[in-house]
């Protein structure tokens, strides 16, 4: 199989390509990445010389380039996105350009080339927040931030392309990932960087916002299963139901670092801050046989060790 993976120099994309190259030695992967501030070729350096791997710097919005690359592959896995909610509040336009127009450009290419599969890597944030219970795949989308709204728009375009043109689209909607190689703007790597520098960690509001954590390797296994066994036109939620408030996660970090609670600096809350995310992943478990394997405590400690060794 030949894959075009977009956003492969980012956090999840770089792990996904590593997973594919290791598990399927006869597969070929083209990594298309714009190398925004969040993309880093260091994330791919352990497989950069693999003969089955090729990197191409470029934008998913670039029609000519996407068309050229897509002609060489059987499937497209769209992982590229603008991903930081705070940035989307400051400047939403680039989120629409990449997450909406970029997705549409890839869909249009897939339509013209008649690809076998188009996997759209989306997020649980498209459903918005809820205080109790979990969202199912057919629940209403109610995104809160420009980021999640742009991801929801990308998902809807995927479903429209399936319905209108028969494009073989499958969507995954995963909860928050943790693991190595993440740009230090998201809560966990950002806080680790601060603690390593001896600084306080700025926690939004009172820290009670709940996030549902999954190790990035378990997300990659889910995308792999969806790619190979997922049913075209379907949506699969992905989650280990490992819910922790941001304050709990911060306390776990402080404990690992052996630091006191006064290292927390409570700051003004993010506008529109979602209170709790939760998706029901029973469909991917029962239909595709996916199960999360990494235990939160073990994965979390290993991740902290990785950042301690690899942060500059
Ligand atoms: N991180 C999470 O917890 C999480 C959870 C669920 C879903 N997701 C989804 O997974 C995907 C990847 O997230 P991530 O955390 O790895 O993001 P990231 O910010 O670490 O990486 C995004 C990558 O996309 C590239 N990129 C951005 N705009 C591009 C463009 N126009 N053309 C080509 N490349 C471009 C960047 O250079 C970067 O390498 C996103 O679609 C996100 O919505 C992330």
Image (cartoon, rainbow, N blue to C red):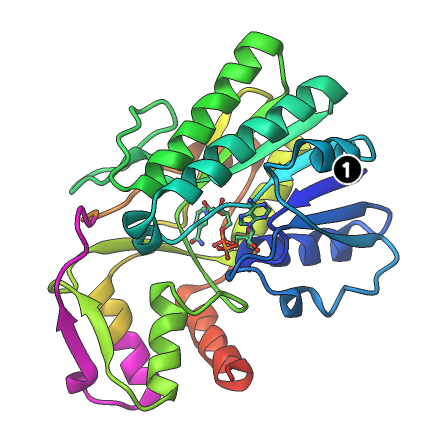
Identify the residue at image location x=49%, y=19%: 159
Q: Position of residue 287 (x, y in %)?
A: 53, 30
Q: Nearer the viewer, residue 163 or 233?
A: 163
Counting labels gives 1
Residue 202 visible within the image: yes
Q: Is residue 134 above or below residue 254?
A: above
Q: Nearer the viewer, residue 101 or 122?
A: 101
- Left/right of residue 250 with respect to residue 221 in the rendered view: left
Badge 1, how many Cα within 10 Å: few under 14, some, many 20+? some
Q: Position of residue 196 (x, y in %)?
A: 38, 87
The residue carrying mark 1 is 69
Q: Nearer the viewer, residue 133 or 34?
A: 34
Q: Is residue 252 above or below residue 219?
A: below
Identify the residue at image location x=15%, y=86%: 262
Residue 230 visible within the image: no
Tell me which corner region of the image, top left, top right, bottom left or bottom right, holds residue 78: top right
Q: Position of residue 176 (x, y in %)?
A: 39, 53
Tell me which corner region of the image, top left, top right, bottom left or bottom right, holds residue 184: bottom left
Q: Is residue 84 above or below residue 308?
A: above
Of all residues, the one furthest to the top in this rendering is: 164
- Left/right of residue 83 with respect to residue 75 in the rendered view: left
Per the rendered image, the range of residues in magenta is 251-273
């Amino acid at each position: 199989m030949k894959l075009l993976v977009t956003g492969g120099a980012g956090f999840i994309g770089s792990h996904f390509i590593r997973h594919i190259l290791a598990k399927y030695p006869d597969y070929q992967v083209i990594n298309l990445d714009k190398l925004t501030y969040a993309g880093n070729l260091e994330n791919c350096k352990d497989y950069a010389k693999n003969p089955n791997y090729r990197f191409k710097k470029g934008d998913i919005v670039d029609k000519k380039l996407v068309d050229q690359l897509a002609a060489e592959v059987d499937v497209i896995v769209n992982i590229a996105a603008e991903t930081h909610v705070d940035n989307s509040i400051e400047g939403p336009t680039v989120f629409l350009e990449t997450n909406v127009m970029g997705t549409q450009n890839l869909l249009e290419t897939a339509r013209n080339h008649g690809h076998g599969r188009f996997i759209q890597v989306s997020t649980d944030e498209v459903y918005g927040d809820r205080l109790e219970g979990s969202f199912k795949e057919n629940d209403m989308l109610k995104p809160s931030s420009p980021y999640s709204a742009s991801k929801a728009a990308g998902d809807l375009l995927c479903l429209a392309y399936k319905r209108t043109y028969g494009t073989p689209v499958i969507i995954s909607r995963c909860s928050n990932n943790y693991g190595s190689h993440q740009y230090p703007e998201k809560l966990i790597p950002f806080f680790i960087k601060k603690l390593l520098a001896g600084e306080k960690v700025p926690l939004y509001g009172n820290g009670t916002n709940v996030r549902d954590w999954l190790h990035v390797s378990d997300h990659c296994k889910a995308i792999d299963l969806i790619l190979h066994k997922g049913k075209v036109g379907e949506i699969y939620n992905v989650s280990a139901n490992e819910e922790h408030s941001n304050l709990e996660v911060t306390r776990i970090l402080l404990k690992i670092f052996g630091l006191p609670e006064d290292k927390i600096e409570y700051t003004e809350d993010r506008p529109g801050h979602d209170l709790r995310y939760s998706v029901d992943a029973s469909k991917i478990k029962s239909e595709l046989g996916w199960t999360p394997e990494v235990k939160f405590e073990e994965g979390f400690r290993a991740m902290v060790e990785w950042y301690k060794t690899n942060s500059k």
